[in-house]
Image (cartoon, helix red, strand yellow):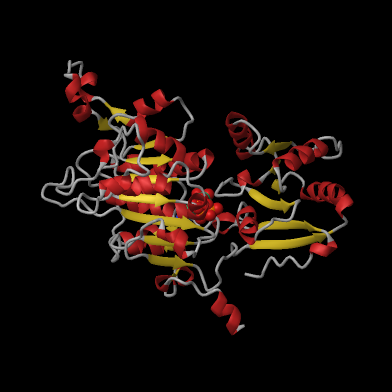
Amino acid sequence: MEEAKKKSMPVLPWMRSPVDVSLFEDCPLDHLPCLDPRLKVALQNMGISSLFPVQVAVWQETIGPGLFERDLCINSPTGSGKTLSYALPIVQTLSNRAVRCLRALVVLPTRDLALQVKDVFAAIAPAVGLSVGLAVGQSSIADEISELIKRPKLEAGICYDPEDLLQELQSAVDILVATPGRLMDHINATRGFTLEHLCYLVVDETDRLLREAYQAWLPTVLQLTRSDNENRFSDASTFLPSAFGSLKTIRRCGVERGFKDKPNPRLVKMVLSATLTQDPNKLAQLDLHHPLFLTTGETRYKLPERLESYKLICESKLKPLYLVALLQSLGEEKCIVFTSSVESTHRLCTLLNHFGELRIKIKEYSGLQRQSVRSKTLKAFREGKIQVLVSSDAMTRGMDVEGVNNVVNYDKPAYIKTYIHRAGRTARAGQLGRCFTLLHKDEVCFHLDSF
Ligand SMILES: Nc1ncnc2c1ncn2[C@@H]1O[C@H](COP(=O)(O)OP(=O)(O)OP(=O)(O)O)[C@@H](O)[C@H]1O
C-alpha cells in the first residue's frame, strides 16, 4: 500500500503539496466575494446559482487572495466545471480594461471543443463589454480575419497610408478561443494579429495538447509573449515561422495598453485536464511560473461522484446482441457507445441500424467523417433527435452534451485515461450517470477502480 502510494507520488516537488479541491464546497453566487454584479446576472441567466468546488478554488487563486500571482495546473474530474473555472475569473479581471486588444487566449485540441468553450465565454463576456472570437477554421480564413481584426480608418471611410496600415489594425476581440492549427495560421500570416498584449493563456485538455506538437504552436506562443528582456530572438529562429506575419507581436516591456503607468503584466498560464500529466518533461514545455497544483482528493484521477460503473461479461461473438439488449433496456435515454476505431464505429452503427427492434435513432460520429457531418450529428444529438451515438474516441474529450445518461464501452478502452474521458461524457455537473463496459471473461481483470 505504502509502495503504491510512493509510486503515484509526483516527481515535481510543487505537485506534492496541492490544493485539494475536494475540501471546497459549492458557493452560492451571493456569497462569492468580489463577483461583478453584471456577471452574476449573466450566470443566473445561464441557470447557474452557485459555483462548483473547482470554480471556487480557482476563484480564490485568481480574484480572491491569490490574485493570479501563480500559474495554475488544474486536475479535476470530467464534468466538474473546469471551463467556467477559468472563464469567469478571466472575464471578471478583463472587465476593467480600457482599450480592446487580445488579452486572453484559450487553446483547445478540437474544433467542437473550441466552439463549446467559446459559447461559455460568449454567455458571460458581453455582460461586461468584452468580445470573444473564435479561430478554428470553421469559416474561411478571410471571414475569420474580418471577425478578429478591425481597421478603424477604413470603417470610418478615411483613406490611409499603406505604410501605417499595421499600426491601424486593431484586435476586434478581447478573448480568443482557438485550435492550434488556425492559431498558427493567424500568427504566421494575419496582419495585425498580435499576442503582444496577451495576459492569460489557457491550455485546456493539456495532456492531449502536449502530445501533439502542431507546428510548434506552444513554443511559438511562449516566445511571442515573452517580454523583451527574456526574449532571445536568435534562439527563436529555429521554430518561429518564416513568413512571420506577427513579427511585431514580440512583447514589449513598458506600459500595459490602456492602463496608464501600469507595467505590462506577466503572462499568466492556466492548464487543465481531468487526467493532467505529472511528467516533468512534458510540463516543462509550458514554462510555468511558480505553479500551483489544484487536484481532487488523493488519487491521481477521479471519476465523477455520481457515476455508476458496470462490467458486462459476454463472449466476443455475442457482443452485438448484448449491446442491442442493453440499448433496448435503456429505451429513449441518450447514450454514447464507444468503439476502438473509426472502422468498427462504422461497422457497428450499420449493424445496429439493421436491428428492426431498436426503435431509436442511432448515428455514427467519428474522425472519418467530415467536420460538417459531425457537427450536424452532434447538433441533432444535443436536440434529442438522435438517441444513440456510436463513436470513436473523437468524442471522448471534453464534449458536454446535456442529458447523456449512459455510456457504453463496446470495446474496452486501451488506457485508464481513455476510460476516464469516455465515462466522463455522463454524470456531468453532479448528475447521475452509468457507464457499461462489455468485456470478455479474459478481460475481466481490467480494473476500473484501480486508480
Ligand atoms: N456552477 C455551475 N452550476 C451548474 N452547472 C454548471 C456549473 N458550472 C458548470 N456547469 C455545467 O457543468 C457541465 C460541465 O462543465 P464543463 O464542460 O466545464 O466540465 P469539465 O470539467 O470541463 O469537463 P471535461 O473534463 O469533460 O471537459 C456543463 O454543462 C456546464 O454548463
Comparing 77 with 229, the one in front is 229
Position of residue 189 relative to residue 153, above or below, is below
Q: Is residue 232 visible?
A: yes
- Please state the horizontal and vertical placement of residue 248, each as a whole percent of the image: 24, 37
- Please state the horizontal and vertical placement of residue 272, each as a whole percent of the image: 46, 56
The image shows a total of numbered marks equal to 0
- Please state the horizontal and vertical placement of residue 306, each as a whole percent of the image: 62, 63
Q: Is residue 37 visible?
A: no
Residue at (50% x, 60% y) in the render? 276
Position of residue 22 relative to residue 213, above or below, is below
Instruction: Residue 67: name its quadrant.
Output: bottom left
Residue at (17% x, 15% y) in the render? 159
Q: Quadrant of the C terminus?
A: bottom right
- Please state the horizontal and vertical placement of residue 404, each as a whole percent of the image: 64, 48
Comparing 124 with 156, the one in front is 156
Residue at the bottom extreme?
2
Instruction: Residue 286: name its quadrant.
Output: bottom left
Instruction: Residue 372: name its quadrant.
Output: top right
Residue at (36% x, 37% y) in the render? 241
Residue at (76% x, 42% y) in the render? 344
Q: Is residue 180 left or right of residue 220?
A: right
Q: Is residue 175 left or right of residue 434?
A: left
Q: Quadrant of the N terminus?
A: bottom right
Comparing 400 with 393, the one in front is 393
Q: Is residue 353 left or right of residue 107?
A: right
